[in-house]
Each structure stands twice: as C-alpha cells, then as structure tokens.
Image (cartoon, helix red, strand yellow):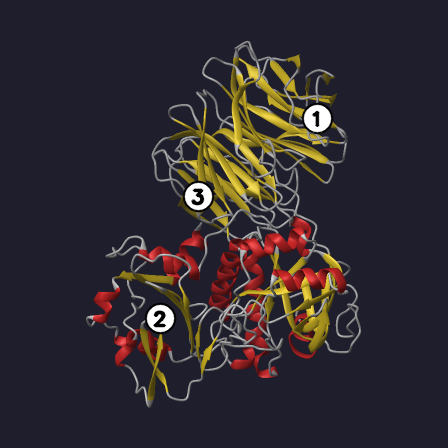
C-alpha cells in the first residue's frame, strides 16, 4: 500500500563486506564533531572506540542487568531474559548493544529506521543495536571504529554488493508482518493489568498467570523513546502468552511533547503510526487491534502540538485499519483531549495515568459520555515491585475496561442499497443516471427520477452509503472515465460530478470502508487494476493509484472488506482466471496477490459471509456458475468449484450472505430469466436451486433486509423490476417498481 512504501523509504540499507569497511569505507557522519576522550572495548574480535565515560555492561541471558537505552552505555552480550528494569523508564539516547549473532552471517549489513532513531548492524559473529537522540554522528563513529558497515543515504532500491546481507539487518530492525496470530479478543479485557519496561520471560508470565490478580500485560512494541531492550518480545512470545490466556496492551512511545520533540505534528504522527503498524503486525496484531500511544505529561505550552499529533495519530491508524488508543496524564493529555473531544479525531480508547490507588476507570476529568463502557483504562499506581510465584517484576498497575468489538465486514456496493430501512435502486437510462426509491420502509417505489442530464453514462452504476450518511454513486462514462456523484439521501438531487481521472474499460466497483471512507476500483484500458480513495471521510478522491503491474486484467472488479479491516479485490484476467489483490487499507499498497484460477467468461462477484469468510462467484466459459470459497477466515481459497451442471448463464451474478452463514447466488440466463443456487449449510455444497423466471437485460442487485432477499434488475422492455423472497428458493415473482 501507499503507507508501506513510505515505511520502506525510512529504512536505508547498505550491504558491504566487513573487510571493505575495515579498509577505509567511511561516512560523512564520521567526520562530524569531536569524539573527546575514548576507550577501546573488545568483544568477539571487534574493537569499539567509545567515550571514556561510558560504562561497559556485560550481560548474559541469565543476568538481571537492565539493558536501557536512555543512558549512555555499551552493553556486551545477550540481554537477560529476566531484566530488572524500573517500570518508569522513558526515552532513548546514544547507546550500543552488541550481542552474539543468532546464526551464520554471510557478510556485513546495516539498516536504519530514522523514525525509531535506531541503527541495526549484522556482521559475522555479532548483531549490533545502536540508538541515538541528537548525536547520530557519535554512534556512527563507534560503529565505524569496529570496522562495521554504516547505513547509506541511498534509496532502498540501490544495488548492493551482497544481496543477502541487507535482509539480515533489516529483518532485525523491521520484521516482516506475520499472519495475524493474536485472537481478536486478546486486546479487550476487564480487570487488572500491569505494564513493565521490558516484556517478562515466558517463565515469569506463567508464574504470574497462576498467582497474580492480573490478566493483561502492557508491552512496548516500538517507538523512538522506548527505553528498554526487548529480548523476549517476539511473535512467538505473544502467541504463547495469548494461548495462556493473557490479554495485551500494545504500547508505542514516540516523540514526546514533554521533550519539545513535536515540531511537525501531522507528518510526525503519520510516520509514528505507520511504524507502529509495522511493529504491531510483526508481532501478530492484525487490523482491528488497538495501539496505545504513550504521550507522557507535558507543559501547557505544548498543548496544541500534542493534540494535533494525537489527532493525526488516530486518523492514520484508522486509515491503516487499526484502532487508536492514547495513554497520558490525567492532568495534561487526558484533560486536553476531553476539552477537544468534538473538534479533532479522538482515540477509540483512553488510558489515563492517575495514581490514586483506585482499581477502576473513574476519573473526574472525563465525562461519563466520553469513552464510555468498554473504552477506558486507568493506570492507578506505578513503580511497584511485586512478587508472584517467586518472581519479581517492577510494574505499573492498571485497571482496564476495554471491549473493542471487531468491526463488521463490508460487502461491495451494488446498483441498489438500503438506507434507514428504505431501498434505492439506481440505473442508467438513456445514458443518464436515474433512481427508484422508497420514501418510507415498505412503501411503494417513487420513480424513475432522473439525476443527471448530460447523457454520457453507460454500464452498471454502483452505490454505497458512507458512515456519515452520504450516498456516493459511481458510473462509467461513454468516454471511458468514471464520474462520482454525491447524494444526501435516497431521492435527493445530486450535484455536479467529480470527474475521476484515467480511462477504464468496465463499470467501477466501490465500497464504504470501516474507516468511514469510500474506495473505488476499476480496470484501466491498459489492463491494470486501479483505485480511487478518500483520505478522510467525506473528502475528495485521490488517485488513480495503480495496484497491479501486469497488463492482463479485463472487465469490472469486485471488492470486500473482512472484519479485521483487510480489503480484497477480485478481477478477471484476459485468460479467464480470477486474480485476488489484498490491501490493509484503502489507498494502501498491495500486501499480497494470488491467482485463483478458472476459465471465466463473466465478471466476478464477491461476498463476506456471516462466518467472516470470503466467497467469489463467476460465470464460466461454458455458461456454468463457479465458486471459490475460504474454509475459514484468512485461509486459502478452494475452487473453482462448478455449482451448476447446465450452462446458459451470462453476466455478473449477485451473491447474498444469509445470517446463518449460508450464501445464495443469483444469475441471469442468456434468455433473460434468473436462476438461484444456495447452500443449506454454511460452507457446504450448493444443493438448492430454483428458476425465478423473468426477462432481464442487465446485471442483478440483491439486498438482504427484514429477513428476506430482494432482487432488482432491468427488464428487456427497459422497465425496472423487483422480486422478493423470504427463503433462498421462495420468491413472490417479478413485479414492476
């Protein structure tokens, strides 16, 4: 996605042989400043020249010394699995950790995350983590003194001398996203929790699970001001603790208003949110998970910067498909957010620091209506040494009342929609956009009402209603472009269209995303998949942004969004197969693609079932209906599976998910009649079928409402028809609306 591209630009890599570095390869940073008095520290054959005043701390996995980056020091060895770190540590400065390499290293490489202010170096026998505050040149000199490679200012795509080496350093600095292994409910909890500077070992967590009052643990997943080394914090550790019944408070601690570090609130917050999502995903926290920004207490002069930063943090996390949460002092950040509640984007969860010793979520500064039940946490004590099961940890104590229900999945827009119990149906008639609509639930339809008069539209329009109530209508023009119309309510007039740039070859697909924005997908005349998307709810559309490089797509795509926020788009290739493309957010970079196979004649239809699985349906080259199905959420697709034995079908089918997890599919025959196929059991075979009759000329729309399905289509006589069924095969018959 677009954000992933921005993230990638933050990591500047240079893979070089250590011998080359030792031979004199240098960086401009090495010449900056004066190193002052130095001493040489030797470890595993490497000699580091560090400031004479820096302590040298030797650690092993069995030691309890705290590897803390908030003070100048060089640490030698693996950090202990049970570090004894004060819970209140904050910030990072110039410090070095050198530890044995986890495995064979073919050559030297370096990577840098400028947002986290952290350099990682991998060289034969060692791995180095270097943090810095304002003196990056100092840590660069120290690394160079040991003959280690330094990050380059070159772009990530620059050719390197050792192809495998850069991956080693980058993998440590920014691990690749793992599959979302953390259960959706593992970031929701009611009861006491604790947070510690370093994630405890699995042994300590097991001891505390059996004898402490705590059920949730706060973990520092990243940020430039994260003070403690995290040797235990891996995706495997998170998965193990989740399986043991622990819930989580994922914490990110970036720029602090307290330190006057927030100078460009919006851009800094976007960068922090993107980095936070990268780190969360690497640990198995998928879209829908909250990430808590740790904004420590700050002076009143920093109020505007802090609020602007936190608003942009929330907006960006939502755009990424994640929930936003904020930790701050009751007397500064929390008070300021309450005062700004109706002005800016607010976090989904508030976590206030009010050390009153009360294990509840009551704070006099937070009105009852702000962050009500299920949206609060309270740090009620801090810096407490506690022992359970014989194991001692320095902790801050928390009470949580957090219940973040997963966002519902979103199915694609169609040519008809429901709004407040009424139905609106949209159609292109005489190359203009017209509508038939109900003025009250169950009422007769009014229409046709002509919405445009320019006479330049074609194909099948698509309609979606965003969370703010606005209806967006998209249609292909006779010139091969897409126009967007905005309607305040069914039957209302539309204003002048927004003309979306680019040339397309089929009707657009659209979706009203969980984040409140609308995204549109089209196949360009060059065979690529493109998207237009809002960057904020109700705003204009960015794009077109190309999502695929191959020029082999055709027709109209389909798009759905599952409960965890992931968008997936399905389009037909010129060879008749279905190609799937995944994004973590609207406008984001493509995170995965797959060829589902098949030899299809028509455009695909996609739907998210009540079980949060995706199903895709299309008419094959011989006029038969085929399906592709996930067996469980996020799984690979099975299929194509032939759902009808006889041919004669055409066009794009429509799929309707029933509340019991089954799906019924409706398709038009070459003679214009409509057939239905349905499942009797969720995920089971399509063993039900019925002929619904009719003489239809256009694609179908199908809506599930009031316990039944309503189908809408244009007849061969140009009139608009509807048919309603209370069960997959029990319909009342087509009637003019």
Quadrant showing the C terminus: top right
Q: Are marks 2 and 1 in contact (CB under 8 Å)?
A: no
Q: Which residue is at a point 60% across and 41% down the rendered structure image?
A: 562
Q: Position of residue 550 (x, y in %)?
A: 34, 36
SS of the residue at dot 3? strand
| Cα distance in 3D space between marks 1 and 3 | 33 Å
View extreme (bottom): residue: 37
In-front residue for pair 351/654: 351
Residue that badge 2 annotates: 44
Which of the two discs, 2 and 1, labels the residue nearer the N terminus?
2
For residue 206, what is the image quadrant?
bottom right
Residue that badge 1 annotates: 709
Vertical comparison of 682 with 304: above or below: above
In-front residue for pair 502/432: 502
Residue 338 in view of the camera: no
Residue that badge 3 annotates: 500
Q: Position of residue 648 (x, y in %)?
A: 52, 10
The label shown at residue 279 is: none
Q: Residues within 10 Å of mark 2 (few under 14, many from 20)?
A: few
| Cα distance in 3D space between marks 2 and 3 | 60 Å
Vertical comparison of 191 with 477: above or below: below
For residue 352, what is the image quadrant?
bottom right
| Cα distance in 3D space between marks 2 and 1 | 71 Å
Q: Position of residue 102 (x, y in %)?
A: 42, 59
């Amino acid at each position: 996605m677009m954000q992933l591209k921005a993230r990638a630009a933050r990591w500047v890599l240079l893979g070089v042989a250590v011998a080359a570095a030792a031979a004199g390869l240098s960086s401009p940073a090495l010449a900056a400043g004066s190193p002052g008095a130095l001493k040489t520290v030797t470890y595993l054959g490497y000699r580091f020249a560090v400031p004479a005043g820096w302590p040298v701390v030797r650690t092993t996995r069995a030691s309890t010394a705290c590897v803390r980056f908030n003070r100048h020091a060089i640490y030698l060895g693996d950090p202990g699995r049970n570090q004894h770190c004060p819970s209140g540590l904050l910030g990072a400065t110039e410090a070095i950790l050198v530890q044995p390499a986890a495995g064979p290293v073919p050559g030297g490489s370096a990577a840098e995350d400028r947002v986290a202010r952290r350099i990682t170096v991998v060289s034969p026998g060692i791995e180095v983590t270097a943090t810095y505050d304002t003196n990056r040149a100092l840590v660069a000199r120290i690394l160079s003194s040991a003959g280690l490679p330094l990050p380059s200012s070159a772009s990530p795509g620059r050719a390197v001398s050792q192809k495998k080496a850069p991956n080693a350093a980058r993998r440590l600095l920014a691990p690749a996203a793992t599959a979302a292994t953390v259960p959706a409910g593992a970031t929701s909890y009611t009861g006491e929790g604790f947070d510690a500077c370093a994630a405890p070992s699995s042994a300590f967590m097991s001891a505390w699970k059996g004898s402490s009052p705590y059920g949730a643990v706060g973990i520092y997943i990243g940020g430039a001001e994260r003070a403690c080394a995290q040797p235990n914090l891996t995706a495997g550790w998170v998965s193990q603790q989740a399986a043991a019944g622990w819930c989580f408070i994922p914490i990110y601690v970036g720029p602090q208003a307290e330190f006057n570090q927030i100078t460009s609130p919006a851009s800094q917050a976007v960068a922090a949110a993107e980095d936070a999502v990268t780190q969360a995903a690497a640990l198995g926290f998928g879209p829908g998970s909250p990430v808590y920004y740790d904004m420590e207490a700050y002076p009143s002069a920093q109020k505007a910067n802090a609020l602007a930063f936190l608003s942009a943090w929330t907006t960006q996390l939502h755009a990424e498909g994640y929930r936003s949460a904020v930790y701050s002092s009751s007397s500064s950040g929390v008070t300021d957010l309450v005062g700004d509640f109706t002005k800016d984007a607010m976090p989904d969860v508030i976590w206030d620091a009010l050390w009153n010793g009360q294990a509840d979520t009551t704070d006099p500064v937070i009105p009852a209506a702000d962050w009500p039940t299920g949206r609060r946490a309270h740090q009620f004590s801090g810096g407490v040494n506690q022992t359970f099961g014989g194991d001692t940890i320095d902790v801050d104590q928390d009470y949580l009342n957090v219940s973040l229900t997963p966002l519902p999945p979103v199915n694609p827009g169609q040519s008809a929609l429901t709004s407040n119990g009424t139905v609106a149906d949209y159609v292109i008639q005489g190359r203009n956009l017209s509508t038939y609509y109900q003025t009250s639930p169950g009422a007769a339809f009014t229409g046709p009402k002509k919405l445009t008069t320019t006479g330049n539209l074609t194909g099948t329009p698509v309609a979606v209603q965003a969370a703010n109530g606005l209806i967006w209508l998209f249609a292909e023009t006779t010139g091969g472009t897409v126009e967007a119309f905005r309607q305040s309510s069914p039957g209302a007039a539309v204003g002048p269209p927004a003309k979306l740039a680019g040339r397309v070859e089929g009707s657009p697909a659209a979706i009203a995303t969980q984040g409140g924005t609308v995204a549109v997908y089209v196949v360009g005349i060059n065979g690529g998949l493109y998207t237009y998307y809002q960057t904020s709810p109700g705003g204009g559309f960015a794009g077109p942004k190309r999502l695929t490089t191959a020029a082999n797509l055709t027709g109209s795509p389909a798009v759905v969004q599952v409960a965890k926020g992931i968008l997936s788009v399905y389009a037909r290739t010129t060879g008749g197969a279905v190609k799937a493309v995944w994004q973590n957010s609207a406008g984001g970079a493509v995170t995965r693609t797959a060829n589902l196979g098949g030899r299809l004649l028509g455009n695909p239809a996609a739907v998210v079932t009540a079980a949060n699985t995706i199903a895709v349906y299309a008419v094959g080259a011989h006029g038969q209906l085929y399906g592709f199905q996930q067996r469980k959420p996020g799984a690979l697709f099975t299929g194509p599976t032939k759902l009808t034995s006889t041919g004669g079908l055409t066009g794009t089918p429509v799929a309707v998910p029933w509340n019991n997890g089954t799906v019924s599919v409706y398709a038009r025959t070459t003679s214009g009649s409509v057939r239905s196929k349905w499942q009797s059991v969720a995920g089971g075979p399509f063993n039900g079928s019925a002929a619904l009759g009719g003489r239809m000329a256009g694609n179908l729309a199908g809506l599930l409402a009031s316990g039944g399905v309503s189908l809408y289509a244009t007849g061969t006589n140009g009139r608009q028809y509807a048919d309603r069924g209370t069960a997959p095969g029990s319909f009342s018959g087509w009637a003019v609306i």
